Image (spheres, grey):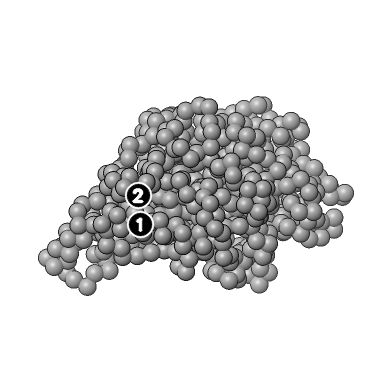
Amino acid sequence: MSATDEDVDRTPSERVDVCVVGAGPAGALVANRLAERGRDVVVLEAGPRFDFDDRRERMERAIRPAHGPHSVWDMGGERDAFSASGERFYPLNAMRVKGVGGSTLHWQGMVMRLHESDFERRSRDGVAADWPVSYDDLRPYYADAESAIGVAGASDNPFAPPREEPHPMPAFRPSYSDSLFAEACEELGIAMHSVPNARNSAGYDGRSQCVGYGTCDPVCPSGAKYSADHTIAAAEEAGARVLDRVPVQRLETDRSGERVEAAVYATPDGAEHRQEARQFVLAAGGVEIPRLLLLSKSEAHPDGLANSSGLVGRYFMEHLFAGVGGTLDEPTRQNHVGFMTSECHQFYDNDFDGVGPMKLEFLNYAGPSPVEQALTADEWGDDLLATLRADYGTHVAMGGLVGQLPRKSNRIALDPSTTDDHGNPVPDVRWSLGDRTRRTLAKANEIQRRVLDELGAQIEWTVGPDNTGPAAHHMGTTRMGTDPESSVVNPRLRTHDVRNLSVASSSVFVTSGAMNPTLTIAALALKAADHVDEDL
């Protein structure tokens, strides 16, 4: 960190216009937009500031076997304790970063818009529910988000929703392994197209062009991949005040319970402070937002703040991974590109019986690295070298994302039997999969196997219905709607129950779709900021 605790003033500001909880992409965009409009903004972030100059060292942690994955961004311990009492274990700490920048510090950086159909799932398929906003409502915010983040892309996806403007930067060229897939896909009538990436194909917004470190997840040492600390810096330049290492303990309302008066936060010395504001925006993600609301129960809100519907924490959704991989009898140049350059959305709005949206991916980082192979090998010396030379560089794989329908039983609750470093109950992730999700995973695997068979690959592994895992996309725990009895926030992203409390997060998603959610999070954050500005 760039400053010691003794150097940092974490005392509250006098009553400000807006208090934002969370300094990830949503909180950063909200703070920056409002600060640029002259609003007095304070951002409270539970985790630390990370020094940009430390990124190369963090990259080394990511690739050296002596360091576990949690150590790259200092996750773990009592601060980050959680429970997972659902049907399936949920590895929460493997998927998040607490700190200025949030999970964009370690994300893959793929940024696509939801399809028009995602907003109309009940009307189109007779399942789940429709959003109270449409794609057209978010369309201008999507464009603003792409400019704010910096997106490299092309208009070559025939299945993408309509847009008027080009992406801010040109798309990355297809990788070598993409070219191998292209011939097989053409034979099968399967379309390939570019992936919109939140990384610079050219210099953009003061950040360099991608230089190919290849360690995008979990760390980009060059800063070419967007991370929200960049936007936080812009917000501070515009006048926002950002406090790190100040986890919010609860929100306190006035006597009527109709307005939040203060966010009570803790500082590293153990003291508690109250930050007062006219408006509050929660932007701490789909797990910590419902947790904070549940921790903020009071006489006026006995079941938790903004929870008269009983739905805070409910309808937790994830994206599940589907994949098939194997080897070819020719070089594939695996791991030469640390991110995806081609995808297929052809089967997203499909008419398969009982199957939901799916996004198929052509992986550029299939197969183990030589270090991983060497560490797990039973051979030594020349024998090991010969095995590495024979095996490395011949792997190929497809991946994909599948959404799950909102299920009331999937939820974020509190576990009072386990507490964090401030004595608060930890989040308990209660999560399971439904039959529709399993059918969609199986269908994705079927298509993936067809492609690899056409390619002539020897298939060696499959990730599907029985061994799938989550994609670290936390959605749906404060869902949006027009009816206060069946939703938590309204279409303006303000809670039904509390007049000055808004939510900017994937937690407001009504359905999950199968697209990486960050661009939609960003669009909703900008929409929320506009409404907060109108209300001030």
Amino acid of disc 1: Arg
Asked whether the viewer can see residue 71, the reply is: no
Report the residue that reaches farthest toward the right: 256
Left-right relation of 191 to 282 = left
- Relative image position of residue 225 (x, y in whole percent): 42, 40
- Mark 2 crowd level (few <14, some 14–19, many ≥20, 10 Å Cα): few
Where is residue 373, by image quadrant? bottom left
Q: Residue at x 71, y 35 (%)?
A: 532
Q: Residue at x 13, y 68 (%)?
A: 383
Local SS, label 1: helix
Q: Closer to the camera, 60 or 443?
A: 443
Asked whether the viewer can see residue 118, the reply is: yes
Q: Residue at x 49, y 52 (%)?
A: 358
Look at the picture and state if 482 lies above or below 421.
above
Q: Look at the image and tell me in which quarter the C terminus lies.
A: top right
Local SS, label 2: helix
Disc 1 from disc 2: Cα separation: 8 Å
List the residue tagged with mark 1: 450
Left-right relation of 477 to 515 = right
- Relative image position of residue 181 (x, y in whole percent): 31, 48
Amino acid of disc 2: Leu
Residue 188: mark: 2
Contact, CB < 8 Å: mark 1 with mark 2?
yes
- Mark 1 crowd level (few <14, some 14–19, many ≥20, 10 Å Cα): some
Look at the picture and state if 263 lies above or below 222.
below
Left-right relation of 29 to 461 = right
Where is residue 450, by image quadrant? bottom left
- Relative image position of residue 144 (x, y in whole percent): 56, 31
Look at the picture and state if 171 lies above or below 481.
above
